[in-house]
Image: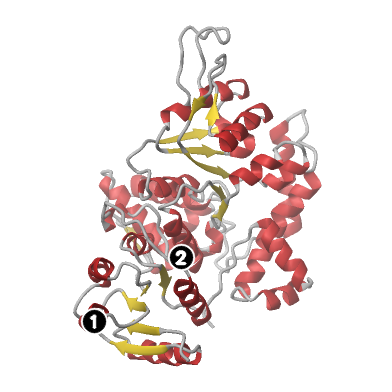
């Protein structure tokens, strides 16, 4: 007895053959077509329990077909596939009622698992009112790491779930928060961003919750806080790890009870905001140091998203560079082109400042240099003006891992001057090394955790626990 009938539409003969074999082995009846017209006829006649379709087909784009399918058969699950692996592809698939979106090349096991979930669950998707154009893409990159993020974001758009974004400085955490707002159900409401690290600690509670007249010296009139300003929209709490404990306690009450009081106020105020937090710190380590509330962490960490540093997604550098060149030209800076060799030099750079560093480099190149073509030599000069940059991508011989850590520690202690860093330094340093080490091993093994454990010399269960605890994104490459 079959588990259901799958309608497959793709103009690529090889993909149809592979899907037919894999789905048939999984117990499904499969019907194959190379065009949208046949798929529409089957659907209109009531055939099929689930649709798997490519987006670009010879006679019609699936994004134009999906709304018609949802009108006549709203409960029919649709899984779309595409080689156009952009953020907007994932968003459009979600907005037009697709159950899920899979970038090509896709994992057959993942596809079969997704089909199983789709057929076993009732689904009623809310259709969005807007159709954002390709010109408004807020996130750039087609790497496997970014594809996973796009899919998570697409699933979150029509929810109010609290999200915490983890990532190094410059990885684009606020861009992700804005995308969640601008393409989500609260897009008609305000988006209010607050950087905890930029506000004096004694003023954070007043900044977030507002204050009444006379609440403290200098409070000559009532002031609305960021929660009130964000009512009906999204409140983005950047650098949440820098929030003082008193403010954490008040924030926890808001998340638990949906209400707050202003500083100096007595009346509870109901609030309706979506919270998106972000941090470049290890919150679990801050919890161990007594600097962050564990109960607040669990309230904020409903959906964690880890943004990979640029060094883990170097395949995205060409797309990012082209994007920043276009942006610079729109702002009136001279038009530039870039050599292929220059892109290769960029891919070998470590990018400690991540995407922000890359953006600043492109702006600097377009503004300061008269030549129309950005060359590899020019990139080398800008990335390492003292001439230590090596084409092999390896750091200079004297900059071993040990020396790099020693230099980092010297800079860290210099930042604190006569004071000392917070307690727990040993574990913080180990954690900072552990994340890229495990990430590199997973990247080298295409996400195969068994092989990565062998490479690292760790027990498989130990590696899995570290991946979970450190919130490391596992990306499975093509087999």
Q: Which residue is mark 1?
A: 45
Q: Is residue 222 left or right of residue 94?
A: right
Residue 326, x across and y down, in percent = 30, 53
Question: Residue visible at 38% across and 85% down?
Answer: 5
Residues at discs 1 and 2 in contact (Cβ within 8 Å): no
Instruction: Identify the image quadrant of residue 16.
Output: bottom left
- Quarter occupied by residue 455: bottom right
| x 40%, y 55%: residue | 139
Provide the secondary structure element on which disc 1 rests. Answer: loop
Does residue 218 lie above or below 257 as drawn?
A: above
Residue at 24% in and 70% down: 72
> Alpha carbon of mark 1 to alpha carbon of mark 2: how far?
34 Å
Judged by depth in the image, the label closer to the viewer, 1 or 2, is 1
Asked whether 315 or 400 is in front, the reply is: 315
Q: Position of residue 137 (x, y in %)?
A: 33, 55
Screen quadrant of the C terminus: bottom right
Viewer-closest of 246 and 467: 246
Q: Point out the residue furthest to the front here.
A: 1
Percent across and percent down for residue 358 are 46, 52
Label 2 sits on a secondary structure element that is: helix
Q: Is residue 271 above or below residue 167?
A: above
Q: Quadrant of residue 466?
A: bottom right
> Is any atom of residue 334 visible in this view?
yes
Assess disc 2: are there few (<14), some (14-19) or many (≥20) residues with their C-alpha within 10 Å of its C-alpha: many
Q: Which residue is identified by label 2?
A: 147
């Amino acid at each position: 007895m079959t588990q259901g009938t799958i309608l497959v539409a793709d103009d690529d003969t090889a993909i149809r053959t592979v899907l037919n074999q894999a789905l048939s082995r999984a117990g499904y009846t499969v019907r194959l077509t190379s065009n949208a017209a046949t798929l529409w006829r089957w659907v209109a006649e009531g055939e099929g329990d689930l649709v798997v379709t490519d987006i670009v087909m010879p006679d019609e784009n699936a994004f134009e077909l999906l709304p018609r399918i949802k009108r006549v058969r709203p409960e029919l699950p649709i899984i779309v596939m595409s080689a156009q692996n952009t953020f907007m592809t994932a968003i459009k698939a979600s907005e037009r009622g697709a159950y899920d979106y899979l970038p090509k090349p896709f994992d057959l096991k993942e596809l079969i698992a997704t089909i199983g979930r789709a057929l076993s669950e009732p689904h009623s998707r809310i259709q969005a009112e807007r159709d954002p154009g390709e010109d408004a893409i807020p996130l750039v990159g087609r790497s496997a790491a970014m594809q996973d993020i796009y899919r998570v974001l697409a699933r979150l758009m029509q929810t109010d779930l609290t999200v915490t974004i983890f990532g190094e400085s410059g990885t684009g955490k606020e861009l992700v928060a804005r995308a969640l707002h601008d393409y989500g159900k609260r897009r008609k409401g305000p988006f209010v961003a607050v950087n905890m690290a930029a506000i004096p600690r004694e003023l954070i509670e007043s900044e977030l919750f507002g204050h009444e007249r006379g609440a403290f010296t200098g409070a000559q009139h009532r002031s609305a806080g960021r929660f009130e300003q964000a009512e009906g929209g999204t409140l983005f709490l950047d650098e949440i790890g820098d929030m003082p404990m008193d403010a954490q306690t008040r924030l926890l009450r808001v998340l638990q009870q949906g209400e707050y009081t202003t500083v100096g106020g007595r009346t509870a105020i109901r609030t309706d905001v979506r919270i998106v937090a972000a941090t470049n710190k290890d919150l679990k380590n801050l919890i161990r140091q007594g600097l962050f509330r564990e109960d607040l962490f669990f309230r904020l960490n409903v959906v964690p998203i880890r943004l990979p540093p640029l060094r883990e997604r170097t395949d995205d550098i060409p797309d990012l560079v082209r994007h920043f060149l276009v942006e610079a030209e729109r702002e009136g800076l001279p038009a530039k082109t870039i050599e292929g060799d220059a892109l290769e030099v960029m891919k070998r750079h470590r990018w400690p400042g991540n995407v922000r560093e890359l953006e600043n480099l492109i702006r600097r190149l377009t503004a300061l240099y008269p030549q129309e073509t950005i060359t590899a030599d020019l990139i080398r000069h800008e990335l390492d003006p003292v001439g230590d940059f090596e084409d092999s991508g390896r750091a200079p011989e004297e900059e071993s891992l040990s020396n790099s850590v020693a230099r980092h520690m010297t800079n860290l202690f210099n930042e604190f001057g006569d004071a000392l860093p917070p307690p727990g330094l040993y574990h913080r340093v180990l954690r900072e090394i552990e994340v890229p080490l495990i990430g590199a091993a997973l990247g080298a093994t295409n996400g195969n955790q068994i092989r990565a454990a062998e490479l690292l010399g760790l027990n498989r269960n130990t590696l899995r626990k570290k991946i979970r605890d450190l919130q490391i994104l596992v990306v499975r490459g093509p087999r």
